[in-house]
Image (spheres, grey):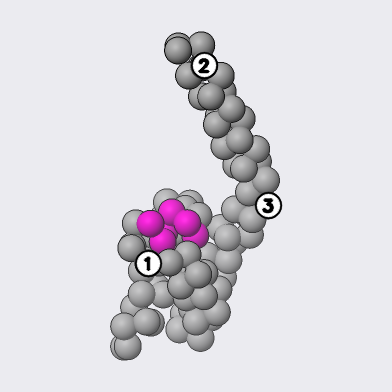
Amino acid sequence: MPIFEERCEVLANYIIKNNATVRQAALINGISKSTVHKDVSEKLKTVNRGLYTDVKQVLDKNKSERHLRGGEATKNKYAKIREDKKNT
């Protein structure tokens, strides 16, 4: 099995097991998020169709929730800025 096929399955299993985002999988594996996305959304379909179906469910869920995570990150960012201003 070529290396990219193994990588596709490793990435997919990590995402499924940890309910991880593409960014999290990329960070843990030391590769770009573009590579992770291409591996699990395109290449994996031909390597392991069952695993592709499972990881697609997690990716679709993450996509539907991303606006919430972004809003929370922005909220936390400005809360930290306010806190820093208080402490100076």
Is 71 placed left or right of 3 in the picture? Answer: right
Q: Residues within 10 Å of mark 3 (few under 14, many from 20)?
A: few
- Per the rendered image, the range of residues in magenta is 22-27
Dot 2 corresponds to which residue? 85
- Up the image or down, 22 lies above or below 1; here it is above
Q: Quadrant of residue 27?
A: bottom left
Circle 3: residue type:
Ser
Dot 3 corresponds to which residue? 64
Q: Tell me the quarter of the image containing the N terminus.
A: bottom left
Q: Are marks 1 and 2 in contact (CB under 8 Å)?
A: no
Between the residue at mark 1 and the residue at mark 3, the CA separation in whole angstroms equals 24 Å
24 magenta-colored: yes
Asked whether residue 49 is in view, the answer is no
Q: Nearer the viewer, mark 1 or mark 2?
A: 2
51 magenta-colored: no
Name which of mark 3 and mark 2 comes first in the sequence: 3
Q: Nearer the viewer, mark 1 or mark 3?
A: 1
Element type where label 3 sits in the image: helix
Where is residue 44 drawn, in percent x and y? 48, 78
